[in-house]
Amino acid sequence: MKLTKYISKCIPVFSIGLLFSFPSVAQKLSVAALVCEYQTNPIGIDVVKPRLSWKLKSSGQDILQTSYELRMSKDSAQLKNGKNLSWTSGKVKSASSVHIMYNGPALASAQRNYWQVRVWDNKGNVSKWSDCNYWEMGLLKTSDWTAEWIKSNIPADTVDGPAPMFRRSFELAKAVKSARLYITAHGIFEAYLNGKRIGDEYFAPGWTSYRKRLQYQVYDVTSLLNKGKNAAGVMVGDGWYRGHLDKWKNIYGKDLALLYQLEVQYTDGTKETIASNKQWKAAIGPIRSSSFYNGEVYDTRLEKKGWNMSAYNDKGWLPVTTAVYDNSILVAPEMPPVRKKEVFHPLKLIKTPKGETVIDFGQNLVGWVVIDIKGKLGDVITIKHAEVLDKEGNFYTANLRFAKSELKYILASNQVEHHEPHFTYQGFRYIKIEGFTGKLDTAGIRAVAMYSDMEATGNLVTSNPMLNQLQHNIQWGQKGNFVDVPTDCPQRNERLGWTGDAQAFSRTAEYNMNVAGFFTRWLKDLSADQHADGAVTWVVPDIMSPTAAGVAGWADAATIIPWSLYQTYGDKHILEQQYPGMKAWIGYMEQKSINDLWNTGFHFGDWCFYSPSPTDDSGKAAVTDKYLIAQAFYANSVQLMINTAEVLGKDEDVKKYQALLEKIKKAFVKEYVTGNGRVVSGTQTAMALTLSFDLLPENLRDQLAGRLVENIKAYGNHLTTGFLGTPYLCHVLSRFGYDDMAYTLLLQDTYPSWLYPVTKGATTIWERWDGIKANGDLQDPSMNSFNHYSYGAIGDWMYRRMAGLDTDTKNPGYKGITIAPHPGGDLSMVNATLETMYGKLQSKWQLKNGLFILDVVVPPNTTAEVILPNAANTEVTHNLVVSTLKKAVKSGKDLKYPVGSGSYHFEYHFKP
C-alpha cells in the first residue's frame, strides 16, 4: 500500500510530523463472537430474560454500530431462512452491542432458542446475518423436577469412606431424537451413560452456599443413548459437601445424595423420563476415600468392571433409599466449569539427599497427576505432592499443615495400569513416588492443570525477562486459585474463598481472564451468606463460625468487586444484583461506628505486612493501625456506593451517601491526621490508602505523597505493604507524579519485592514476600503458601499504567477507552493486549534510539483517547486523519488524541 506524506498545519499549538494517509478500501462489516450471559451456546440457563452480546468485525476505521436487529427461532434451518421466527427485535437504533436483553415471549423450561444478529454502522454498511447461535433454558420451575433424591444404604458411606456408586439399567423402545440429563448431588459427581463419561467438567455441581443455592448441570447426552438397553452410572465423592474444610467436616450434611433426571425425546415426538428413584441400586467400589485435602485412595482390585454398562450383573448391589430435600434452591450454573487444561511432562527426575524419588514438573500448578505404571499385584503406589524442595533439596510438605495431599493406588495386576484421581485436586510442582520398586519411566507420568475454564483475555510482555516471569506467576496464581471459587491457596488444609484476597486481586483477574460469570456467581453466594445485620463473611461460601464476619478490607468485597466488574464489563445488572447487599454492608459499618468513626471490633489489618522478624523491636515493622484501615475502607465503600447509586439512578441514595462520606472523611482527619498532614500510622499502607481514597483535603495530599516516597527510600527502595496496601501503592505513586518510584519498586529484586520470589525460582505468587529466605531457609510452615495470588494485584498497575490500557469511567466496559502508557524503569518495550467485550485492544510501546514508538489497536464500536506522554512540544509522526488532528488537545506535557476503532502508529523523540 502506497503511503502519502504531508505536514498538517491545522493545529498551531504544537508541531505535527509526518501524516500517513491510506487509500479508501471497501469496508466489510460482519458480526462474530455471539454470547448469551457471557457463554457461548449455553445449555441450561435460568435467566428468564437473558442478555445477548456480539462483536463487530470491520477493516475500516472509526466504525460504530448505529443499529442492530435480532431474530430468534426454535429451528435453526428456519432461522437461517428468516421463517417461522419466534421473536424479532426489529431494527433498533442503538450503539449497544453488549448485554442486550431478550424481550420476546416468555421462555419455557428446556426451550432451545436459536438466534442471529445483524448490524448497521456509521459508514452506511450493513452486515449479513451472523452465524446461528443458541441458548437453552434449564428447568425453571421446582415442579419440573420429577426425580427423587436417592442415597445409599451402605454403612461405610461416611465422610472419609468409600465413594458410593449408583446405577440403573433401562430400555428405550424407540429411536432417540434428543436427550438432556439434569443432574446434581450432595457431594461431587462423575456420571456415565453406557460406559462413557458424561461431559468434560470436574467437581460438579461446584461449590455454592449449599443451604441456599445448589447448582445443577445440564448435559446433551443424545449421542450416548441407544435404542434398546442402556445403563446409567454415577459415582459421588465427599467434595465440599461433607468433606474436610479447614478444621471441620460434614458441614452441610453427613449423607451424600444424587438427583438424576434424564429427559428423552423420541423421533415420533413422544417423551420419556428416566429419573432417580427406588429402582436404582448402590454399591461401593475402588475409591476407598476421597478428599480435597488428603487426596484419594484407589484399590484397583475392587473395580467393578462394566458397572456402568447395561450387561452388568448388579446382583449384590443394595437398593437405595429416597430422601426429600428442598428443590427450590436449585439453580443453573452461571460460570465456566472446572476442566482439564495444560499438561506438563516431567522436567527432571531427582534423587534427593534423603534418597527420595522426586519428579519436578517445572511449574507450580493445581490439578492432578496422571500415571501409567507397571508393577505387581498388590503393590501400593503412593504419590505425594509438594510446592518446593527444602534448603538441602529434599521433598518438603510441612507447609501443607495437616493436609496429606497424596494419591494412593493399589495395583490389581502385573500389567500397565492407567491411574488418575476423581474427586480431589492438589497444588504442587514436585511429586514423590513411593512403593514402586522397578525403574521409573517418566514417559508415562504427566501433571494436568485444572481450573475454571475462563477465557484468557489479557497478555502482557515486556523487554525485561524477570517482569515477564512475574506476569506468568500472576496468571498461574489466578489459574491455580480460581477452582470454582476464588481460593486463597490450593495446597494446604484451607482452600477457602477468602473475601479479602478476592477483592484485592479482582481488577488484575479481570485483565487476565474473563471472570464475569465466575464472579457473578460467587457474588450471589456472598449475598446468600451475608448476615442479617449486613456483615459479610470472611470466606464465601461461608463455613466458619457466626462471628467470622464484618472485617474491614475483607467484607468490602461486597462493594469493590461489583464496581470493578462494572468498569470492566459494563454490566449494570451486576450492580443491580448486588445493590441490596452493598447497602447492607454500609449499614453494618454505620451501626458499628461511633460519631462516624469505625474503631470497634476485630480486624485482620494489613495482612502479611513487612517485618524484619517476628519479634521485631527495631521499629521497622510496618504496622498500620487496624482502625485507620477500617475507616479508610469504610470511606471507599461509601464512595463506591455513591458511584453505583448514580449509575442506577437512585438520586436519594446518592445524596444520603454523599453526606455520610463527608462525615466519614472528617472523622478520619480528626482521628488520624496531624495539623501538618502527617498520618499517625506512618506506613506505606496508611499513606497509600489515605491518598487513594481521597481522605485528605486536596491541599494536604501532595505533601503526603512526598512523605510516602521518603518512607520507601527509608526502606532502601522497598515496599512494606501487606494484602490491603499492595494493590494501591504504585497507583498512588503514579497518580502523584512518582512513576519513577513506582518503577523502582516494580523492578526491585531484593526482599521485600515482587521480583525477589522470581530470583528464587517462583512460578506463582507467594503468600509471603520471603517464603524462601535469602539463605534458603523456608518461612514459618504454619502460613507459607507458594501459590497465593494477593500480591499479584500489581498486575492491575502493569496493565493500566505501565501499558496504559484503561476504561473510561463514563463509558464503562471499554466502550470508551483510555490508552495512556507510562514508560519508565529500564524497559524498552511493553506490549499489552486485552480481548474486551468489543474485541481486541492493544497498546505496544517501544523506546529506540531516543524515539518513543506507540502502536495501538482500538476495537470496533468503541472510541479511545490516546495520551502520548511528554509529547506536547515535539513533532509526532502518526497515521491520523485530519479530522482527528483537529480534535487533539495539549494537556500539560502530554498530547491527547481522540480516536475511533482502527490501528494507529505514533513516533516522536521522547524526553523523560
Image (cartoon, rainbow, N blue to C red):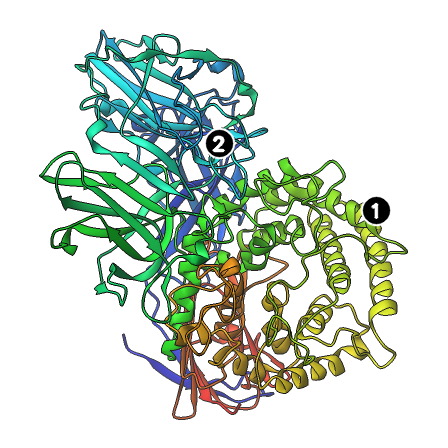
Q: Is the residue 545 above or below the residue 612 in the image?
A: above
Instruction: Give me the C-alpha separation between circle 2 and circle 1.
Output: 36 Å
Amino acid at the residue labelled 1: Gln
Q: Nearer the viewer, mark 2 or mark 1?
A: 2
* Quadrant assignment for the N terminus: bottom left
Q: In the image, which disc is placed on residue 591? A: 1
Task: Provide residue 633's location: percent of width, then percent of height.
Answer: 72, 59
Residue at 71%, 71% (x, y): give it. Answer: 686
Q: List x then y, in percent, for residue 126.
A: 40, 47
| Residue 100 visible in image | yes
Q: Nearer the viewer, residue 537 or 614?
A: 614
Query: What element does badge 2 sit on?
Result: helix
Q: What mark, if any, has residue 242 been given in the picture?
A: 2
| Snapshot quadrant of residue 582 | top right
Residue 752 is left or right of residue 405, and the answer is right
Figure quadrant of residue 696: bottom right
Q: Quadrant of residue 159?
A: top left
Task: Give the residue type that dot 2 points to.
Answer: Arg
Decide if residue 567 is in sight here.
no
